[in-house]
Amino acid sequence: MAGLLAGLANATVNASTVLILAGLGELISERAGVLNLGVEGIMLVGALSGFVTTVVTGSYWLGLGVAIIAGGLLSLVHAFLCISLNSDQAVSGIMLTLLGTGLTTYFGNSYSGNSISGFPERTIPFVGEVLVGIPIVGPALFQSTVTDYAALLLVPCVWLFLYRTNLGLELVSVGEDPETADTMGVDVYRMRYLAVIVGGAFAGAAGAHLSLAFNQIWSAGMTAGRGWIAVALVIFARWRPERILLGAYLFGLFNALQLYSQALDLTLAAGTPFASLFNPVIDFVMNPTIMSTYPYLATLLVLVVTVVRAENRELAQPSALVESYSRESD
Amino acid sequence: MTRETLTRRNALKTTAGLAGALGLAGCSGGSGESGGSTSDGTETSGGSTSSGTDSSGSGGSSGGDGVRAAFIYQAEVGDVGWDRAHEDARQAVTDRFDWLETEFSEAVAPGDVQRVMEQYIASGMDVIFGTTFGYMDPMASMAPDHPDTVFEHCSGFQTMENMGRYYGRLYQARYLCGVAAGLLTETNQLGYVAAFPIPELVRQINAFVQGARTVNPDVTADVRWTNAWVDPPAVTQAVNALTSDGADVINNHQTTTAATQTAAENEAWAFTYTTSMAEAGGDWYGSSALFNWEEFYAPTLQAINDGSWSSDAYWEGLDAGVVGVDDFGPQVPDSVVSEVESYQEELVAGDRTVWQGTQFEGESDSFLFGEMQSYVEGINGEVPSS
């Protein structure tokens, strides 16, 4: 049992890093009022550019850097379309996803099957051995790649940035009420550009984590929908960074459960009362295909609960999300 | 023949042809009403004359002047995997026959394949190879309109007078990998990462485990379904789950090297399929169940060139060489290799079948091909309903 739990914990942490990175990026962008549905495509571009750079130069650090820049550049396209040209944010984002998927499939073609040595797993200096000794969660949390640690560290950083710095508060204000922010002297355009580009850089890093740390291969479409989960995750987290962490672990846990639960037989034995009644239900609920929908069901549930409880507005969606802004006097 | 067919149908066709010709001049108009061939636009005039139902004008393309073949792939051809296996074979037959000319299209979605095929037919292709299941229906709907073109579809079940179907008994090679796995395992636990619970995959899982249990009856196996054809992170997690449960041999059915690589990292023997993934497995590479499609394409193209081709349902295996086992990894002992070779000889000679001793012994090919939906003994759990 302890082995199973340790395995589950490890798989959960492993699955969540990419969601934390992409989710935080999307959160920053949405907090400034710009929805970016291009996460999936940007992640793929990050994964491929990071991988190719590492193949060519042998340096995974350089690979990570290139992926971050590539993610930022691609989201610059989105920023230009949505902020400067006031295009439809949903259309632009989906276009980026399709573009990223197509381009990486084409250009990544000859790189599938290549292998690299990417980010190794490391323990934290000095205290590492003690921390890894913690039962069940120790190895999962404290024997990881640099990108895993970075993702964890970025959660409080983003929180501090958004709520404890001037720049962060300006960014939030731009997503809530761009007119007022503009009146108060915040450069709405510059702020939104910054948020979208930084958000894209996070998505690029998420992709690089997949191809340089987690899998160390390139394979077309290797994000397999995780960009979309990241978008759902932001809604699930109700635009709060600390809940991104919680949500990423929960989604990661679903992901891990789907694979780990296949070894367990949870159906009732033939003689048990009501066995014939419950077993089809258990079979259905535990079906791997059904289980892969759980993150989305959870998001749906959070949406319903939030709406029903009509919580403090501050906790919910930025007021100006998806709304383009233009100065009347222009 | 002359008077009867000259009436309505041909009149319509002529109209369509004219409309098509006019379409060239700019006003591409409604030529789509003419019954069968709705390929409007430029090529309509040429297309509709040769595609007429029983127009005896067979003196068209290849008499003895060689064969032109088109290959259509659903994905981009990478360095490994399903499409790579077909592409390797295409290059091999192109090199082998000087009378053969080939072209290929990659990344063709099933929804677009009809347009791609129309183009190839218009450019005079004699045979079209469609290499994914999703092409079956589009090919079957086009075949009757193009009786002079040979259609060959990989992995489906439908055949017609000018449409054949082909596939390889890869499960035989999986069985041989299983024999090696049964000899290599120390924990007697095998792990298998699979994509979707369809008969094709269930058959290969069963064959692998049956191979292992033939040489080592204590072997049991776990299967993890990932519900994706390509999802490297999920594959990696599935392999981690399997090895942490004690599996020391991993087999895989996803077109990525992730399983092979992760198995090797966890010091478990790595087996895989379609093309060799020896590099990703390193010292822990077991082997791979391979498709050698050249063994099908070469005789088929030869038959088309001779004029002796006829439609059939090709499902051959080790004896035809269309499937095989890759070279074993560097650490696999010679004794294991020779054991596998002796099993291979028995299978090819017909002294042994993969399914003997299982509930599938004596089942028909159509059952094996399309209906196998339960595990052989030794595999934990049940096949999830797909």
Image (tube, coloured by chain):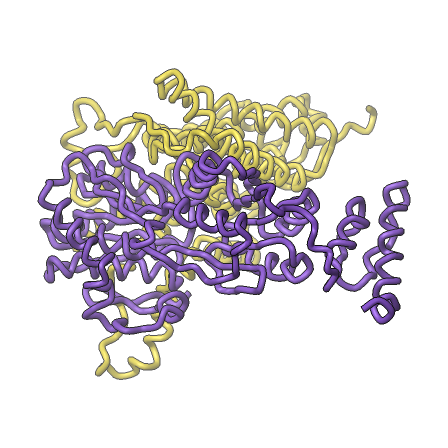
Q: At x 27% / y 35%, what residue is drawn?
A: B278
* Image quarter hosting the N terminus of chain B: bottom right
Residue B92 visible to the viewer: yes
Chain coloured yellow in the rendered structure: A
Q: Is residue B376 above or below residue A4?
A: below
| Chain for colour purple | B
Residue B129 appears in the rendering: no
Image quadrant occupied by the C terminus of chain B = bottom left
Query: Residue sitting at 23 percent across and 48 percent down?
Result: B250
Which of the 4 image quadrants contains residue A13? top left
Q: Is residue A45 left or right of residue A322?
A: left
In the displayed structure, B170 sits above or below A230; it is below
* Residue B122 image offset from top left, x and y in percent: 70, 46
In this rendering, the count of numbered labels is 0
Q: In the picture provided, is A267 more to the left or to the right than A187? A: left
Q: Position of residue A70 (x, y in %)?
A: 52, 24
Residue in front for this viewpoint, B38 or A179: B38
Estimate the x, y position of residue A264 in percent, counting from the top left.
24, 62
